[in-house]
Image: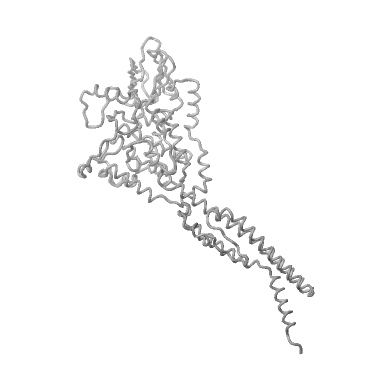
């Protein structure tokens, strides 16, 4: 038997089921519906659905068949007119009957119906979910007891998988031996690997040259408009259930949903918390990938998602939402091509929007991740460990739980200081060096313009000295005054250009002879003060000022007028002629 493609829709009084059955024998078909059960048979197709609401046979039901498209359309009256059926696009959850719930393969449930109802009630209760992990006193456990039982995967339900698939998973995950590595050791190794990978040059390059990042931030993914429509809808109506119709699935996505195996998951409170926390971590990585690629997938998409998610890359477990944000922020600044804190906050805001849109939007994102991993040779194993189970589990999750998760994420605040990478100190030091380099370039430019002027004045002085010998004393006094005026102008210009920089480091004094000296040597008490964090970070402020002083000394000496030298030499010859003995 083949499971046909189908789609469900509703209006206040009727539930409409559209079933596509090409090449079926339409002369022989059967339809059965009662309560929450619906069955359709037309050889070779068979469809059995468990509906989220009750329907009734009262004579108002209708059916039609489009021979060109091969589609049966059946309209079924609702038992309670006006009732809204939630989750009609959760196709996987609709396919299997309620009583066929199992926890996992090779495990038999004792009293299956009672256990299933108890698990469903426990998972779907309306009480507020506690997002904090219960703390227990530390108990020392021997290494022999830890090694055989290191779990990972969806809800920490897997173990021993990586040991069997070591060759395939070595290129997918960063942790080398998760079957024998406890959770605490995984975190220590992850933090050490992130510190070793962090590149200050790459980070500062993206920090100062952020044109590409700003362009990326302008991109609006599909959930931006959907979220705006939902907010507009909420302003008109308080019924939050109806906003699920804003998210639609393509035919390819519906095919993916029909291929999943429907099953239930026996999760305790801690395991359910890990599932919700892991969902946030995976969605953050997906939002970053969608933003930087502007929705156009490439060969690096699978690498980006699994590398930025510690859940997928390190099999990490979490105790609160703050840990997830810190981990994601660190990995964004350590691994991908674009490493900017604004991208971290962009993914954070997008994840909140997706969670508030509900499980339809979350499922659509998970299906996209599933497709990306499925098309990537080594990454497809992560579908078996995490994503496929998430796609099935999310369809049965209460919308109230997801709304509470979104609120918990909104209450989290993330700063650069919390990432533990000393980003603020690094940025402050880089900005100081940039200011010093800008001031140095300005000084070079201005002094370069002064030198030609002094040369022209010197040539004019030589011409006047050759034509008028009687005005030697006047030329000498004029040359001295011009030299003093030139030095005074240079001192004023250097002080105006270097004033802001020298206030943060050490001041330069231009001596009368054109020499530079550091005033820090005249103030020993200042040199004993603790230098600022930015100077300690790069250690370049002092050497840069000394180099600037040497260059200024050389330029000031070079810029002395030639006229002064010529006049002094002429006067010396005249004085020698007066003192020479007469023949």
Looking at this view, is 253 or 463 the one in front? 463
Q: Quadrant of residue 64?
A: top left
Q: Quadrant of residue 316?
A: top left
Q: Is residue 561 left or right of residue 535?
A: right
Q: Quadrant of the C terminus?
A: bottom right
Residue drawn at (31%, 30%) of the image: 261
Looking at this view, is 243 or 105 the one in front? 243
Q: Position of residue 208 (x, y in %)?
A: 52, 48
Examine the rendered structure and indicate whether residue 82 appears above or below residue 518: above
The number of discs equals 0
Examine the rendered structure and indicate whether residue 299 appears above or below residue 443: above
Q: Position of residue 180 (x, y in %)?
A: 25, 44
Residue drawn at (37%, 9%) of the image: 58
Looking at this view, is 193 or 305 the one in front? 193
Looking at this view, is 466 or 178 the one in front? 466
Q: Position of residue 477 (x, y in %)?
A: 73, 69
Q: Quadrant of residue 94?
A: top left
Q: Is residue 136 left or right of residue 9?
A: left
Q: Position of residue 207 (x, y in %)?
A: 49, 47
**Render colour scheme:** one colour
- The residue furthest bottom is 583
Examine the rendered structure and indicate whether residue 185 appears above or below residue 238: below
- The residue furthest top is 59
Residue drawn at (52%, 48%) of the image: 209
Q: Is residue 200 left or right of residue 449?
A: left
Q: Quadrant of the N terminus?
A: top left
């Amino acid at each position: 038997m083949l499971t046909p493609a189908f789609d469900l829709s509703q209006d206040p009084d009727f539930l409409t089921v559209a079933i596509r059955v090409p090449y079926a024998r339409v002369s022989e078909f059967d339809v059965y519906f009662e309560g929450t059960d619906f069955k359709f048979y037309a050889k070779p197709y068979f469809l059995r659905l468990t509906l989220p609401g009750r329907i009734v046979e009262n004579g108002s039901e209708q059916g039609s068949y489009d021979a060109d498209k091969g589609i049966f359309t059946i309209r079924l009256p609702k038992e309670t007119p006006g009732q809204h059926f939630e989750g009609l696009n959760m196709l996987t959850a609709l396919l299997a009957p309620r009583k066929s719930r199992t926890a996992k393969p090779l495990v038999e449930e004792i009293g299956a119906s009672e256990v299933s109802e108890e698990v469903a009630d426990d998972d779907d209760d309306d009480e507020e979910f506690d997002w904090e992990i219960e703390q227990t006193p530390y108990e020392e456990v021997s290494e022999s007891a830890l090694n055989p039982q290191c779990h990972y995967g969806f809800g920490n339900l897997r173990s021993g998988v990586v040991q069997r698939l070591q060759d395939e998973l070595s290129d997918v995950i960063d942790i080398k031996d998760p079957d024998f590595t406890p959770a605490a050791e995984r975190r220590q190794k992850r933090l050490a690997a992130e510190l070793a990978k962090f590149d200050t040059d790459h980070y500062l390059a993206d920090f100062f040259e952020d044109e590409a990042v700003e362009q990326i931030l302008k991109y609006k993914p599909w959930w931006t408009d959907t979220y705006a429509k939902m907010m507009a809808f909420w302003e008109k109506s308080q019924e939050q259930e109806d906003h699920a119709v804003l998210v639609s699935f393509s035919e390819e996505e519906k095919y993916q949903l029909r291929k999943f195996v429907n099953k239930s998951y026996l999760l305790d409170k801690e395991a359910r918390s890990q599932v919700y926390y892991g969902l946030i971590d995976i969605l953050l990585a997906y939002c970053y990938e969608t933003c930087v690629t502007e929705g156009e997938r490439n060969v690096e998409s699978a690498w980006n998602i699994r590398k930025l998610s510690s859940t997928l890359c390190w099999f990490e477990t979490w105790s609160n939402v703050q840990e997830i944000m810190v981990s994601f922020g660190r990995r964004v600044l350590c691994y991908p091509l674009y490493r900017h804190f604004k991208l971290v906050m962009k993914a954070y805001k997008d994840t909140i929007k997706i969670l508030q849109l509900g499980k339809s939007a979350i499922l659509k994102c998970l299906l996209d991740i599933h497709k990306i991993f499925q098309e990537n040779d080594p990454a497809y194993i992560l579908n078996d460990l995490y994503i496929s189970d998430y796609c099935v589990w999310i369809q049965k999750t209460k919308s109230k739980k997801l709304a509470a998760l979104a609120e918990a994420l909104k209450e989290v605040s993330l700063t650069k200081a919390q990432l533990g990478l000393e980003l603020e100190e690094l940025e402050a030091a880089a900005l100081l060096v940039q200011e010093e380099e800008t001031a140095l370039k300005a000084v070079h430019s201005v002094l370069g313009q002064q030198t030609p002027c002094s040369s022209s004045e010197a040539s004019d002085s030589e011409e006047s000295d050759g034509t008028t010998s009687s005005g030697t004393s006047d030329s000498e006094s004029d040359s001295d005054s011009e030299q003093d005026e030139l030095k005074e102008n240079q001192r004023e210009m250097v002080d105006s250009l270097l004033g802001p920089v020298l206030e943060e480091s050490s001041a330069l004094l231009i001596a009368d002879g054109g020499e530079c000296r550091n005033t820090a040597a005249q103030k020993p008490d200042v040199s004993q003060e603790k230098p600022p964090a930015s100077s300690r970070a790069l250690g370049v402020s002092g050497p840069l000022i000394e180099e600037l002083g040497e260059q200024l000394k050389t330029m000031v000496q070079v810029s002395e007028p030639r006229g002064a030298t010529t006049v002094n030499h002429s006067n010396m010859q005249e004085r020698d002629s007066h003192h020479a003995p007469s023949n």
